[in-house]
Image: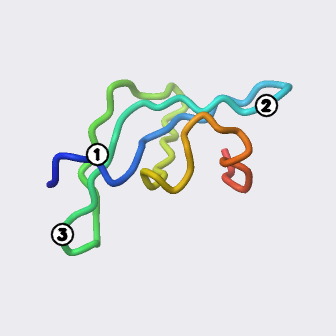
Amino acid sequence: MTNKPTHHALQAIETKERVIWNRIGAAWVHGDGKGFNVKLDSIPLDGEVILREVGAKEVGDETAMEGATA
């Protein structure tokens, strides 16, 4: 496992106006690319965790998260 995570672990909170993306942890891809080590700082009550690549889109940028389903 490298020091820098390869993915952000996120929680999507849907409101009437928008989706709020809350970073709840990080993930590191295995060397063989077939799995992840995941470190969560909190666990969503609905149990749903979304993994997004670091650097692909800025977390919290709603326009960057378009197309990502909650």
Residue beneath the point at 47% across and 32% down: 23
Residue corresponding to mark 3:
31
Q: Which of marks 1 and 3 is in front?
A: 3
> Is label 2 in a helix, a strand or a loop?
loop
Residue corresponding to mark 1:
38
Question: Mark 2 and mark 3 in contact (Cβ < 8 Å)?
Answer: no
Q: Quadrant of the C terminus?
A: top right
| Vertical side of 6 occupied by 13: above or below | above
- Compared across the picture, whether 28 is left or right of 24 comes to left
What is the C-alpha distance between the residues marked 2 and 1? 27 Å
Question: Mark 3 and mark 1 in contact (Cβ < 8 Å)?
Answer: no
Report crowding for label 1: few under 14, some 14 to 19, many 20 or more residues within 10 A (C-alpha): some
> Is label 3 in a helix, a strand or a loop?
loop
Q: Position of residue 20 (x, y in %)?
A: 66, 29
Task: Please tell me the numbered disc located at residue 18.
Answer: 2
Residue beneath the point at 24% across and 51% down: 37
Q: Where is residue 50 in the image (x, y as percent from the top left)?
A: 51, 46
> Is label 1 in a helix, a strand or a loop?
strand
- Compared across the picture, whether 48 is left or right of 35 comes to right
Task: Please tell me the numbered disc located at residue 3.
Answer: none
Q: Nearer the viewer, mark 2 or mark 1?
A: 2
What is the C-alpha distance between the residues marked 1 and 3? 14 Å
Among the 4 quarters of the image, the one containing residue 16: top right
What is the C-alpha distance between the residues marked 3 and 2? 36 Å
Residue beneath the point at 21% across and 75% down: 32
Three-letter residue code for mark 3: Gly
